[in-house]
Image (tube, rainbow, N blue to C red):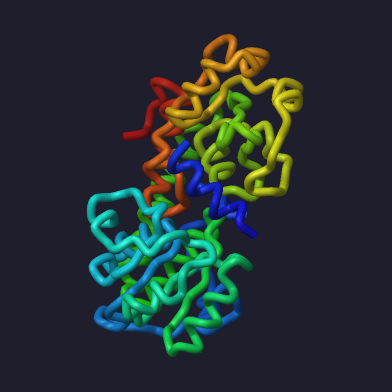
Amino acid sequence: MRAPFVLCCLVLFACGGGGHDATARAPASDIDDFGSPVHVGTPSDPARIVSLNPTTTDLLFAIGAGPRIVGRTEWDAWSDSVRAIPNLGPGLGPNVEAVLASRPDLVVLYASADNAAAARQLRSAGVRVIALKVDRLADFRRAAFLLGDATGESARASAVVDSVTATLERVRAATDGLRRPKVFWHIWDSPIITIGKGSYMNDLVEIAGAQNVYGDVASSSPTVSLEDVIRRNPDEIIAGPIGAARIRASALWQTVAAVRRDDIIVVDTMLVGRPGARLGEAAVSLAKLLHPGIEGLP
């Protein structure tokens, strides 16, 4: 399914893991999300990695494997080190010939049906493939551990997970007991796309001390109507800089009470737009925007 991966990409340009027992490592698993084995690597093998998911690119850099990445997607926009890596096109339905031309030892894909054929072709060519679906906070932890094992960077992967988890728990503690405003997170405008319970962004909203008005929808990125947004009556609207400007300029969006009040929170899409190693920073930023003057956070 395209929605979660495309959601991540839209966030970058307009992306059950919230439990308290997050510090413990999940049970060891050597199977990726296509059901294929994940082989243990070393800090020098694989030597050439292609990452076709912005989230896994982010994670590979965080665990110390970034210098080994030789290919990334057109959606990888952060940071300068990532942009210097050759762009191999879209992360869904990739050009297998272009990927093979970069001579990878390992290719990391988003575990979508769109990528199943590419995974088979790459494996047939003798390339190791890991397919991961990273949509929720729990997915982030599992992906970090698997990538750490696959690259011989398991200790650094555990350190990244521990750091992110500790920050998320600090944010949760800081917002505990505060008023929890109802929020609508604007992702896309035509059609209107928001976040549902299946998205890590819903986890972030809850940890940062708010309620997602579409938190009752199982999908990660539901399409909704403006009439339903009006009916659900959010206290505040969350949007990226481009989305916020469009909302403020739209006569249609003025029918939403929160827009008329200009209760619009503008988020840094580069920070909140993927469930990677900056999740802790994203939660801190969102909590401060939702609760100005909040105590207990850096």
Q: Is residue 227 visible?
A: yes
Residue found at x 56% / y 36%: 187
Residue found at x 40% / y 50%: 166
Q: Note whether 203 is above or below 4 in the view shown.
A: above
Residue found at x 59% / y 10%: 260
Quarter occupied by residue 104? bottom left
**Residue placed furthest toward the top:** 261
Quarter occupied by residue 113? bottom right
Name the spot of residue 131 as percent of width and height, x first. 52, 72
Name the spot of residue 291 as percent of width and height, x first. 46, 24
Q: Note whether 129 is above or below 113 in the view shown.
A: below
Q: Nearer the viewer, residue 5 or 17?
A: 5
**In which quadrant of the rendered image does the N terminus lie?**
bottom right
Q: Nearer the viewer, residue 284 or 183?
A: 183
Quarter occupied by residue 212? top right
Name the spot of residue 236 as percent of width and height, x first. 57, 22
Left/right of residue 268 with respect to residue 262 in the rendered view: left
Name the spot of residue 125 as percent of width and height, x first. 45, 88
Left/right of residue 161 with respect to residue 259 in the rendered view: left
Left/right of residue 93 with respect to residue 82 in the rendered view: right
Q: Nearer the viewer, residue 275 or 141?
A: 275
**In which quadrant of the rendered image does the C terminus lie?**
top left
Residue found at x 46% / y 70%: 95
Q: Note whether 113 is above or below 77 in the view shown.
A: below
How many numbered circles are shown?
0
Q: Is residue 152 visible?
A: no
Q: Nearer the viewer, residue 207 or 189?
A: 189
